[in-house]
Amino acid sequence: MRGFLSKHRRPSGFLVLLVAFALVPLWVKSPYYIDLLVMTMVNAGLAMTFVMLLRTGLISLCVAAFWGIGAYASAVLSVNAGLSFWICLPLSTLITAAFALVIGYVIIRNAGFTFIIMTTVLALLFVTVVGNIKALGGYNGISNIPAPDSIGSIVFDTKVDFFYLGLVILVVVVLIISAFYSSWAGRAWKAIGFNPRLAQSIGVNVFRYRLLSFVVGCAIAGLLGSFYAHYQTYINPNVFNLFPKTIFIQVYAVLGGAGFAILGPLVGAGLLTFLTETVTVVVQDKAEYTFMVVGALVILVVVFLPRGVLSLGEYFAKLWAWARRGGGRDGGPQPEQTLKSAGAAPEEAEGA
Amino acid sequence: MSVILQLAFDGLTIGLIYVILAAGLVLILSVTEIFFVAYGMFFMWGAYAAWYCESGLGLSYPVAVLVAVAVTGVFGLLSYMLIFKRLQHMEGRFLVTVTGALGLSLILEKAVLPIFGTQPKSIPGIFTQAWRLGGVHIELKKLVLIGVGLLVTLVLFWIYEKTRVGRAMRAVSSNAEVAALHGIRPMWVYLLVMGLGCALAGLAGGLFAPAYNVHSGMGANVIANVLLMTMLGGMDSLLGAVVGGLVVGQVLSFGQYYFGQMSIVYLFLVIGVIIYFRPNGLLGHRTDLGV
Amino acid sequence: MTTPAGSSNGPLLRVEDVSKHFGGLVAVNHLTFEVEEGEILGIIGPNGAGKSTILGVISGFYPATAGKVFFEGQDITNLKSHGIVQLGIGRQFQASTLFMSLSVLDNVYYGFHLGYKTPVWNRLLRFPSALREERELRARGAEILDQMGLGAVKNEITKNLPHGHQRILGVCIALATDPKLLLLDEPMTGMNQTEIATMLELVRGIRESGITIVMIEHNMSAVMSLCDRIVVLDHGQEIAEGLPWEIRENDQVIEAYLGKDEFLLDD
Ligand SMILES: Nc1ncnc2c1ncn2[C@@H]1O[C@H](COP(=O)(O)OP(=O)(O)O)[C@@H](O)[C@H]1O
Ligand SMILES: [Mg+2]
């Protein structure tokens, strides 16, 4: 990795991006666009948790379900128990983590197709179960979820307030995730994703580290769910369904580049959230056309740009480096070779 | 008593649909090792195609089903040739194939709406005879479904166990590299299996259409059940697909009656316990699929 | 039966009547042998004799069907592989099983997984102690690579390394787990004559640093010159055990290899 994506430039690069992003509401006044930005942040956070588990070689299709658990926990705690958002947020994170611990303890023993089937079914069951629980409002969901209590002079009554709240939450999430990645836990995750047998042979407890990744990822999804519930003030089970929400979460990650744990989801979620809206406008609010266009886009991306949009950046960086060396000799990088070697998504996974 | 018989009969009918679906999915999962989530959408397309040929084009019902089979089979071949053939050998192929299949299912699921409209469809007037036998309501269309389902299952087993093509499938399923050393071209087997598997989904859809309703949510609804069955029976076992399909058909038929919608949840819990103790399912051998 | 852990009497590793079945196939059949501290034990035998399988059982990758394995007097039969590494048995794999898309140094660095002492949250909060530990481990990784002759290529991406270097890197990763006993599965396969000579030196060096070695190898001259003792397997059973010259002249061994021209005893 060279150029603008290089490791030691990342923190400062992120800081610049962050400041620029934080200034956006100064120019953009339309609540519609602010809403899209807030949803981009939530989506990006969810996609980051997807990538986190992917790093250990597991594909989870129930990210949205755990997002939903967090949202429902928070909604119930605030609407029924009358707790403040500032208490609901950590509590619902913990509740989601507890669910993840119990469920993960059972399903993480199986990798590959079995795991992905388990998560697919769990995702669909979430909707069925919640839809059938009267206390949770069934398929009609829960409405009138209160906004966060004001802190000092900050009152959460406009979308811009939520924009900054979401931004703070996202920054915390990114800090937590990147700290995990740069610790030995993150390296153990990656080692498992690269090759579970080799990981075992260096002493990694594959089950325990996969479970850790699952629980941390789900807890973050729950945190975002709590935020989402209080932002939307209304939730219903179908929001958290497999089709299309989890699919979209996976697509954010792949579109940006699954090899890029933080930047990939940010770019992917940003591109797709805005693109979806643009398409919706173009096709005049026919949701089915929007989904079809997104589906086609997904296929084009995995076929022609399997390492995501960001791998283009690496390709250009290599091209630039090659041009600076004066070109020639090895004939420069071929697009395909470079794209294939770019990124660091788990490869050559094999069974134990 | 008659309620129980009725539920068993209905469970058998839907169970045979599941058997066909699960058999096709087992072939695809075990041979190509592509996690083909779009599979449920082929079922839906089979049902829509049969409905359109019968009601829209005025073809006779058996012909309509054959057209549905052909359409979904060709869809399957095309999707392999245009998409999955490229994804299958990429680095990180598990992720890209799953993502590609998800994209495909988005397209297929939503495409029926502008083409066929949002109204649920039905094919009335097909095999309308019905009898009462010991308090059980037996419709001819369900009998036909059961007969065809059994026949297809037998033919499928014959192909898989006795013919050269079937042997090639089994060889590629257990080890593609070794199979290639024995002169089998895995690519052709993959292509064949994708075509055959999707055609089976289409057949199930075509058979499903007159006995039940046709709507755009049916693909997403059915995929979880079919995935559960393949996991229960074993993802590399055709016999497992049959057992899984029949068992799940019965369990859901009785479960819907006694527990309502939550029956699928209980079923999942039970299957989860079984998988906990038998990770490769009741009759499967490989645990490493997609790992 | 059990001797106190770490006692100087008693073998370092004892494989006691171990069998391993894969379905109906008997890969290892009632195998018993011991490994003394400080020696290099060679395991030889024709293809499919069960050599890799017994290493898999010792290192916990396959549960034994019957029998027991003792390490430093402790029963490790039912431990998981990651637990066994922790006790001090490192292993290298038969194929080039490496983190192919990482740099050479990172491969060894990842191998230090058990070496991290600071808890995660110290790293989360970027405490200097955690950062210092990482620097130290990196330095130790570079040291291992220098000792094993890979110092010059430590920043290469692993998949670009020549085969011989990849093999050595596999040993380096195992060394990073700080083993007392090192299991090597055909470390010299596919190497040319000079690479084999290098590998011989490296293995001797590892032994001199106090690590006991069990090595599967097909290259007979390498086995004969390197090993203190040799166990011969055929069809999952031990057919001979002894010093290199004894094995060379053992009729049963020669018979087991007869007609298998890939294993000429004298080359
Ligand atoms: N995971 C496995 N599953 C089934 N059979 C296996 C497995 N691993 C090895 N075998 C079989 O066990 C026997 C011994 O294999 P192995 O220990 O690899 O032999 P060697 O290393 O001596 O060449 C062989 O017949 C092989 O086919
Ligand atoms: Mg071997």
Image (spheres, rainbow, N blue to C red):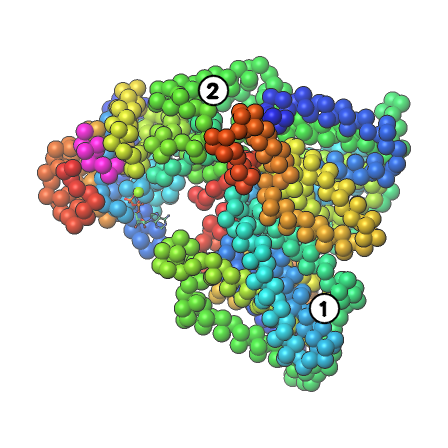
Q: Is mark 2 within 8 Å of ligand 2?
A: no
State the residue position of label 1. B214
Rendered location of residue A211, percent (x, y) = 56, 38
Amino acid bearing label 2: Arg
Classify residue A152 as left or right of residue C213: right
Figure check: B26 above or below A238: below
Amino acid bearing label 1: Val
Secondary structure beneath dot 2 equals helix
Q: Chain of mark 2?
A: C
Q: Quadrant of the C terminus of chain A?
A: top left
State the residue position of label 2. C138
Using the rendered image, report if marks 1 and 2 lie on a common chain. no
Q: Chain of mark 1?
A: B
User: Residue B14 appears in which quarter of the rendering?
Assistant: bottom right
Start-end of magenta stretch = C217-225
**Which secondary structure class fits the magenta region best?**
helix
Specify whether residue A262 is in view.
yes
- Is B53 in the magenta? no
- Closest to the observer: B34 or B270? B34
Rendered location of residue B196, percent (x, y) = 54, 66
Rendered location of residue C132, percent (x, y) = 53, 15
Residue at horizontal 38%, vertical 23%?
Answer: C150
Classify residue A307 as left or right of residue A222: left
User: Residue B22 appears in which quarter of the rendering?
Assistant: bottom right
- Closest to the observer: A95 or B101? B101
Classify residue A352 as left or right of residue A48: left
